[in-house]
Image (spheres, grey):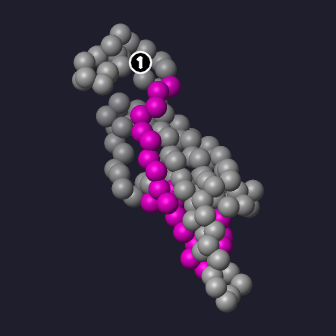
């Protein structure tokens, strides 16, 4: 069995007034997830908890993000969260707050049989 990438999902989240990187990161993950209904585990006849989920968050002040809170957004799977500098912070004129934007990239990997051929760009399969 080989761990192979099955899905790449992207999302954006904001905290309009609080400049809370964790809140924006959670919303970015939800944005990525709510656009899809992943049935890969079911199609491969594997338990949903067998999904390996790697989340990369780009946000201002990445060290302030609560990785456990971001991981808790996922209903199942083995989740790893990496936070790095990115996103945007937009100051609110005349006030002591800002709008914060975070971006999320969610990669789902699953174990598959080694003998499943990879597809090529022309729709054929390669061995």
From the image, tell me which residue sits under label 1.
Answer: 113
**Residue at the spot x=68%, y=81% of the render?**
97
95 or 113: nearer the eye? 95
Q: Which residues are magenta?
A: 3-31
Q: Give x and y (percent) for residue 123.
A: 24, 23
Q: Position of residue 116 (x, y in %)?
A: 35, 17
Left or right, residue 41 beside residue 109: left
Q: State the residue lying farthest toward the top.
A: 127
Q: Is residue 110 left or right of residue 19?
A: left
Locate residue 64: give its quadrant: bottom right
Which structural element holds mark 1?
loop
Give the x, y percent position of residue 50.
49, 35
| Residue 92, placed above or below residue 83 | below
Viewer-closest of 81 and 76: 81
The picture places residue 96, in percent across and down from the top left corner, at: 71, 84
- Residue at horizontal 49%, vertical 20%? 2
Question: Could you classify mark 1 by the number of other residues whose Cα lies within 10 Å: few (under 14), some (14-19), or many (20 or more)?
Answer: few
Q: Is residue 91 left or right of residue 109?
A: right
Residue farthest toward the bottom in the current orientation of the protein: 94
Q: Is residue 1 above or below residue 66?
A: above
Residue drawn where x is 61% and y is 64% of the image? 88
> Left or right of 107: which side holds 15?
right
Answer whether residue 6 is magenta in the image.
yes
Whether residue 107 is visible to the viewer of this picture, yes or no, is yes
The answer to which of 93 and 21 lies nearer the viewer is 93
Given the current orientation, which residue lies at the most extreme right position? 63
The residue at the point 70 percent across, 56 percent down is 62
Q: Is residue 39 above or below residue 93?
A: above
From the image, which quarter does the C terminus lie in? top left
How many numbered marks appear?
1
- Asked if 48 appears above or below 14 in the picture, the reply is above
């Amino acid at each position: 069995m080989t761990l192979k990438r099955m899905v790449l999902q992207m999302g954006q989240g904001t905290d309009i007034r609080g400049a809370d990187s964790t809140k924006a990161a959670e919303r970015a993950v939800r944005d990525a997830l709510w656009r899809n209904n992943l049935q890969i585990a079911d199609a491969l006849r594997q338990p949903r908890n067998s999904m390996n989920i790697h989340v990369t968050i780009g946000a201002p002040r990445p060290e302030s993000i609560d990785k456990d809170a971001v991981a808790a957004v996922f209903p199942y799977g083995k989740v790893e969260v990496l936070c790095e500098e990115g996103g945007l912070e937009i100051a609110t004129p005349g006030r002591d707050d800002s709008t914060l934007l975070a971006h999320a990239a969610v990669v789902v990997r699953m174990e598959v049989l080694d003998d499943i051929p990879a597809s090529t760009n022309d729709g054929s399969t390669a061995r």
